[in-house]
Image (cartoon, grey):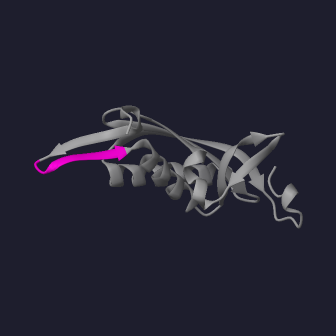
Amino acid sequence: MESKEIVREEQTGLGSIRISDEVVKVIAGLAAIEIKGVAGMSGGIAGGIAEMLGRKNLSRGIKVEVGEKEAAVDAYVIMEYGVRIPDVAAQIQESVKNAIERMTGLSVVEVNVNVQGVAFEARDEEHRVR
């Protein structure tokens, strides 16, 4: 495994513990998608329409920058139509911070929530996310 993929390494009396950046991304993605009002993670914008990712690609909607003891997270999400976006975003921030800190021991210094689209209830799946 490349050293840049390892975001946290610890020596114990029995050996080393290594946590990859992909693990941190998945933790953040799961914590974000569990919040009521989040329709999905966003893989980016193609042709003016946000690409919504399923549960299998949660880490693609997350970017992390990790130092030895601290982490910064960028989450790219699609919200459900009708929710109060600032409230849902604040819940995402808190959930992601708590999950990463609890599971990895890293201190999360910031969680930036980037709303890439809104999911509407629509008959035609092509027009679902804008």
Against 3, residue 60 (above or below) is below
In screen coordinates, is 52 left or right of 92?
A: right
Residue under the point 65% across and 61% down: 37
* In front of the other: 10 or 117: 10
Tell me residue 90's x, y (percent).
55, 50
Q: Is residue 34 left or right of residue 106?
A: right
Q: Is residue 91 left or right of residue 3?
A: right
State how many labels appear. 0
State the image coordinates of residue 47 (x, y, percent, origin top left): 84, 39
Part of the protein shown in magenta: 13-19
Quadrant position of residue 56: bottom right
Whole-percent x and y of residue 93? 51, 48
Q: Is residue 94 visible?
A: no
- Judged by its main secondary structure, the magenta piece is strand
Q: Position of residue 127 (x, y in %)?
A: 87, 56
8 in magenta: no
Residue furthest to the front: 1
Can residue 47 be seen here? The reply is yes
Q: At x 43% / y 42%, what residue is drawn?
A: 21
Q: Residue at x 67, y 48 (%)?
A: 42
